[in-house]
Image (cartoon, grey):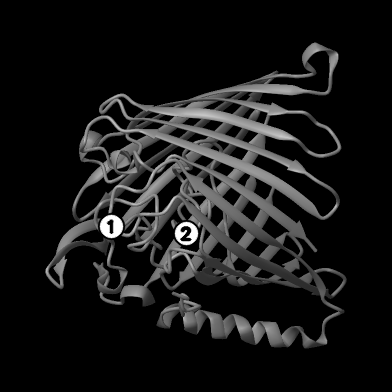
Amino acid sequence: MMKTLFIKMPRRSYAYSLLFALGIFFIAGTASAVEISGSTQFEVTAYARDGQFDGQDYRSNFSVALAPEFFWDWNNGDSSIVFTPFYRFDENDEERSHGDIRELDFLHVFGNWELHVGVRKVFWGVTEFNQLVDVINQTDSVESFDGEEKLGQPLISLSRVTDWGIFDAFILAGFRERTFAGEDGRLRGEFIVNESNARFEDDREENAIDFALRWSHSFGVFDVGAYWFRGTDREPILEASFSNGSLQLTPFYEEIDQIGTDIQATVGNWLWKFEGLYQKSNLEEYSATQLGFEYTFFGVANSATDIGVLLEYGWDERGEDSTAIFQNDIFVGARLTLNDSADSALLVGGSYDADSSTRSFLIEASRRINDRWTISIEGLLFHGGDTNDPLTALNDDDRIQITFERFF
């Protein structure tokens, strides 16, 4: 049976913000010639077994993604627009066949000030395995299991560079709901998440306006950031509900105040890393941290090869009641960088849950084939312990994923 090809359309708040950003796009008609770049991905995934749940009775999957980038600048480079649409077609999971605008960002620089208006991705954090303080953008869960892929966030931001650091202020114009795997998707829990019935504490729902402030600075061996965020939590609470006689999960997005910090110290071969936050809502308040180090052996055996050893620990005050996957977990890993002309790199890592004894293992390798093509390989292995741990649902989802990416 041929599957219908479709693009999930944005909800009303995102559509309004998109129209606003498109107005900026047309203003660029007076700008210099557009520069076009981007990439196309071809992804093949093989699973060791059929999945545990209905709809997961397949062991291979193919998908293709397109991510062009259009760039204009004028005013001697002080004004620019970057436009990065994204679309993926997935063979089996209709929820993973989706489109997004990763960026449609107008930037204007005047003196020590920077103004951004449009749709943008903003990254905060220093740790490797769990980016605890990365709160601006919503996670695109169907795109990547590790949470590193994000949806574009409509926003207005103003930055000021001073001798005391960089100060950023954000108005986040509308809320993006998290994406979840569909019934036929892999790497999901037992029950389907019904996004269409999502509930919000804020009466404005996806039209809510959120705010954030951040300060960052480098001095000596330290790179330090601190922030405050007020608005709709990007991490939903999944509530049990019934639809057509079957049990499903409904996302509930609460209003939160969050303060946090990320600190990195570079001392010789050592990178010491810390992320911490305190969050308060009408339902609960808690603290969480992610901390660790990376030690790098440079020029191993008088070669260009570097080997880094990583260790991190994630802690959440809520313990086993936490809605987060990592709340008392140890992460270990090693990174191999050949520093060759093909940018060959390898990362091997694993996590261990000290409460449930759940373990997961990761291997990532990448290499440039030529000036246009790269290949990357990702392997994931899961071994669930306590049945209450969400990762236990992934016990049959061990996989190898090969991605060919062509740049243009």
Is residue 163 visible in the rendered image? The answer is no
Is residue 167 depicted above or below 301 in this figure? below
Give coordinates of residue 162: x percent, y percent. Answer: 68, 50
Is residue 190 depicted above or below 392 in this figure? below
Q: Nearer the viewer, mark 1 or mark 2?
A: 1
Q: Quadrant of residue 20?
A: bottom right
Give coordinates of residue 73: x percent, y percent. Answer: 81, 73
Mark 2 closeness class: few <14, some 14–19, many ≥20 residues within 10 Å: many
* Left or right: 271 in relation to 248: right
Is residue 204 depicted above or below 169 in this figure? below
Q: Residue at x 24, y 56 (%)?
A: 191
- The residue nearer to you, when weighing 203 against 371, is 371
Q: Secondary structure at mark 2?
A: loop
Q: Residue at x 72, y 68 (%)?
A: 69
Say how many tags the image has.
2
Q: Earlier in the sequence, mark 1 or mark 2?
A: 1
Which quadrant, please, contains the N terminus?
A: bottom left
- The residue nearer to you, when weighing 134 against 214, is 134
> For the residue marked with disc 1, what is the amino acid?
Asp
Q: Which residue is mark 2?
A: 140
* Left or right: 180 in relation to 113: left
Q: Which residue is mark 1?
A: 54
Give coordinates of residue 92: x percent, y percent. Answer: 45, 63
Residue projecting furthest to the top: 301
